[in-house]
Image (cartoon, rainbow, N blue to C red):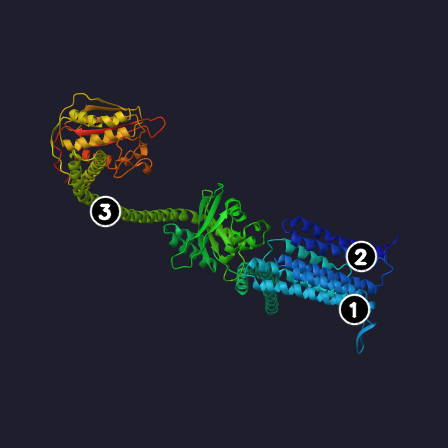
Amino acid sequence: MSTLDPALISFTLLTIMSALYLPVIFFAIVRGKGQELTAGPVILYALVGAGLGIFEAFWRDRRLPQLDALAFGDIEVYGALVLAFLMTITAYVFMRRSPVAWLIVGGVVAVVQVVLLNREMFFPRVVWSSGGLILTNDRLGVAWAVLGWLVFMIGSAWAVGDAYQRSRQPLLRNRLIYWIPTFILIAINDASNLAGMGVAGNPLRVLAAALMSYLALTHYLPDVRQIMRRILVYFITILLIMVFYLLGVNFVEVISQARPYFNPLFLGAVISLLLALLFAPLLGLVRRLVDLWLNIDQYNAGRTLQEYSESISNILEMERLASVAVGIIMENMRVQRGFLFLVDQSRDVNGSRIYQLRAVRNAEERQIISLELAENGPIASHFTRNGRPLLQYDIDFLPSFRAASVPEHEWFKSLECEVYVPISSKKQWIGMLAFGAKLSQQRYTEDDLVTLSALGNQTAVALENARLVDNLMRLNNELRRARRELENTNRALQRLDQTKSDFISIASHELRTPLTVIKGYTEMLLENPGIDPSIHQFLKGIHDGTLRLHEIMDSMFDLAQIDSRSLQLHLQEVDLANMIQEVCQAQSKAALDRHLSLSIELPVLPSLIADPNSLRKIFQHLVNNAIKFTPDEGKITITGRVVDARPSDLPKGGVEIIVSDTGVGVEPNFRELIFTKFYQTGDLAKHSTSRSRFKGSGSGLGLALSKGIVEAHNGRIWVESPGHDEVHFPGSQFHVLIPLTNSTVSDSLK
């Protein structure tokens, strides 16, 4: 029976040890998606470690006879230097710090190492000696490698410790703690190799590589404090049980010696029963003591949910809801700070949904600027699709949140919170709760996140109700503000209208006297037969202009009386048909100049009790407007009818006169506006004193005056038209309705 070759066994074991790096490489490749900067150094570390293991296997199998033990040890030192450098780069990339400085240090170490390898060119045989210690030039490279190894080990350990001190995120601090066993394993392994006491295959290095890969590429690591809690509870409980058992056994021995007739088996059974009965309360006591010692928070989630639900169910004020809801959670879970945010939805120019986070704060509290989140952004997508709490640790370190914009990252960091809980109603994201770190500096456990999700769901209904009330109050405030502004505007318009009325009244009074003088003198001059014909023509123009101004002043005077409700109506019996005939006869020349057809189609109409002069002005303005806004070759028709009695407004019936034309028409939106003072249609540059020019504007007083006179007779005036069209000319119909009775007609507009 042949025996196995020890060298072959050693070679096989070392090869298997080197192959253990392959799972590390595979794990780094699988977990490294999105974390390539961290996975890269880890893979290089595993490859170098595997290479050193294979090299050791070949050397120990005596397949590299040219290398003695000293040379093999030197290569191990150089390998340790490279691995320490890769570990330092991994640590810095893991902590999201720039490794540029350490890359430069590594480059300097490498350059110096190359120089030291050519020792004969730069250094004497004996570089340094002190007593019995001598440093020759052939050991400078190894000494430099050891020094570099120390620099990288100390540098990486210091960086991790500094990050731990600076970090306020328990999850990151927990993750950084895992670097401690990594450093310890590597330090023990490499120090043993440097001292010549290394273990074949460097198993501690393999374990360190696996641990470094796990902690660098795993986002959520088990809580170190919880692990310590379980270990302490387990060992303390076992220790107490052992003490109790030993005391019980000693007690049984004492009893057995004093009372021989007692059965030891019975006493043992009693002790076992007591241990079983004491185990549960003893375990609970140990857990409470360990939790107190490790400062681990414990709260009753069920009681918290009940208290929360009872407290917020009837709150309708948004600020009070935020204060109560956040306060209860902060008190029960011992949290430093908390906020409630409303989420308002809108659309951008491209139609994409925008979520705006608006903090609910009291007026005396520090206000927080709002934030807009794009619908397709990673943070908004997490809240709307997953509906789960989001940790600040996730925003900072998960690869999926790197696509978030810089303002989003800065806004969430400025809150100094650790967890964000979405509030959803009917699958719509409507709010968010944000909470800072716990007072105990512990992480938020999975149970905490489940509890917070339940609290967020309970907040949804109360938030919806409070939001409706808040929107209603805000709408009421806006309505009040709009009403105040409208009242101020109305007062300003009233003052403006009064100023305008005062101007009209003053102007009509003050200008009528000089116009009367001018009219009188021009008429006297026109009647003088001795005036030169050319001067006579000038005087005729002055006289026509004076008449036009006098007509405008009369209209302004009448309007001033209407505005002041002092228009006097001199009522008498009026033959309306005859009056309209006279008006049309006076306008016939203007219609003839434009080749317009002016026809009257009136039936037999009853007499009216009205002011004839005022009514004449109405139809003068209506016929004049029809001539001005009807194109050449157009048609103007005046019709009328007797309106039957109506109890509401025409107890004795009335007479309706309709002035129709084939003109440009009136826009439906302007049917009321044309009856206001000084309203003009068309281009203001077309103002003219001509009575017949097509679309020639006037003073803008005719229809306003007509409306005032008609209403003074308790009548009504309106216009009907398909619309305004200067190509097809749809025309318009102006209706004037005058009651037949004078029983309701006042002598004035008082």
Say which label, 1 or 2, has the lower sequence index: 2
Q: Residues within 10 Å of mark 1 (few under 14, many from 20)?
A: some
Q: Residues within 10 Å of mark 2 (few under 14, many from 20)?
A: many
Identify residue for label 2.
55
Looking at the image, the residue that sits furthest to the right is 1
Identify residue for label 3.
499
Q: CA distance from mark 2 to mark 3?
A: 106 Å
Which residue is at the front of the view, 574 or 23?
A: 574
Which residue is at the front of the view, 531 or 489?
A: 531
Mark 3: amino acid: Thr
The answer to whether the residue labelled 1 contacts the one labelled 2, judged by CB atoms less than 8 Å apart, is no
Q: Is residue 97 above or below residue 597?
A: below
Instruction: Residue 260: name its quadrant.
Output: bottom right
Identify residue for label 1.
140
The answer to whether the residue labelled 2 contacts the one labelled 3, judged by CB atoms less than 8 Å apart, is no
Question: Residue 492, how many percent across, how many down?
Answer: 27, 48
* Residue located at (59% from left, 61% from top): 228
Question: Residue 89, how many percent across, how many down?
Answer: 67, 59
Q: Is residue 261 visible?
A: no
Q: Is residue 315 left or right of residue 639?
A: right
Instruction: Residue 188: name its quadrant.
Output: bottom right
Q: In which quadrant is the C terminus drawn?
A: top left
Question: Residue 88, how many percent across, how many down?
Answer: 67, 61
Mark 1 element type? helix
Q: Is residue 268 left or right of residue 53?
A: left
Say which label, 2 or 3, has the lower sequence index: 2
Q: CA distance from mark 3 to mark 1?
A: 104 Å
